[in-house]
Amino acid sequence: QVPEHEIEMMDDEMILEYTGAEPGYTGPKGLLNNPRIIIDKSITKMTNTVIGANKKDHHYMNATFGRDFDGEVAEDLLTAKEGDMAIDGSGKLKSAEGIEVGNIFQLGTKYSESIGAYYLDRDGKQKPIVMGSYGIGVSRSIAAIIEQNHDENGIIWPTTVAPFEAIITTINIKDEEQKALSEEIYEKLQENGIDVLFDDRQERAGVKFNDRDLIGIPYRITVGKDAGDKKVEYSTRREGINEKVEVDEAINKVVENVKADLVMTRHKPGTYEA
């Protein structure tokens, strides 16, 4: 085996030296200087393919491994790209963005040998334990959730993983009616088991609304000029619902929707919301 860092692409001079032709016509048949040839395993499954003839403007057609050319077979040398044919013949490969949220490490016997971790096999022979490790990154998982749940204004947290399930935004915290009603809503939501954030900052309404969208809490209650009439604005981050309702109705909507979100997720074995 050759370490990856010791492998490099041939330059034009090396290609000419080993093939006798310009770059673009290299093939495994008829190479000069008898070089070591390593072939990706997928090539061995191809028949009647086209290979370079190591001569400018020439190629071999209908070439097949084992009959027309040979070499050492390696498990995986190719870098797949969109549009390539799948090895199993199921169609062309497609490309999609992804994010690594977990990984595994095949540790072998390096550490077990160093700490003397051995076992007896069926024949009574002592052998080092073959080790491995795996893990899921919390920070990577959060990043993956946000990548799949956002818009131009910020995060849209799924209820199951939201840092808070609801947020109360008070337009004018200096107004006693607004402040008192906000505190009442805050206490009632907490009594119903809702994780709620109370934005009582002395900031302009626009700043609070922008911050609220940015951090993406699922359910929102806005307390404003109608606080004296016990009316508030109920809204949702994901669906964009926005309606003026009685304060008790707003509280009930938040409680019912949060519970429904959590129950729906729990009742789907083997699935997750992200």
Image (tube, grey):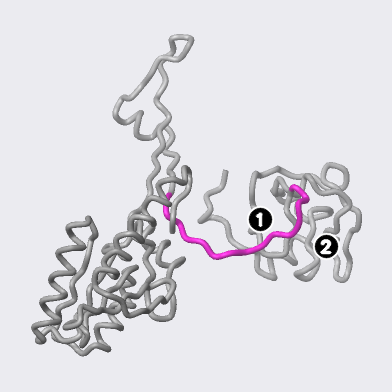
Q: Does the magenta stretch include residue 92?
A: yes
Q: Which of marks 2 and 1 is nearer the N terminus?
A: 2
**Figure quadrant of residue 242:** bottom left
Q: Mark 1 points at which residue?
A: 78
Q: Where is residue 32 in the image (x, y as percent from the top left)?
A: 78, 56
Residue name at image x 65 percent, y 44 percent: 75
Q: Quadrant of the C terminus?
A: bottom left
Range shown magenta: 88-102
Q: Where is residue 131 in the image (x, y as percent from the top left)?
A: 40, 33
Q: Is residue 57 above or below residue 65?
A: below
Residue name at image x 16 percent, y 86 percent: 172
Count of numbered labels shown in the rendering: 2
Q: How far apart are marks 2 and 1 (CA)?
A: 21 Å
The single residue placed furthest to the front in the displayed view is 229
Q: Quadrant of the N terminus?
A: top right
Q: Nearer the viewer, residue 160 or 55?
A: 160
Say which element carries label 1.
loop
Say which element carries label 2.
loop
Magenta span: chief secondary structure: loop
Q: Position of residue 76 (x, y in %)?
A: 64, 48
**Figure quadrant of residue 169:** bottom left
**Camera-nearest label, 2 or 1:** 1
Q: Is residue 171 magenta?
A: no
Q: Mark 2 points at which residue?
A: 54
Mark 2 touches mark 1? (CB < 8 Å): no
Q: Nearer the viewer, residue 48 or 169?
A: 169
Type of amino acid at the residue the image marks with label 1: Leu
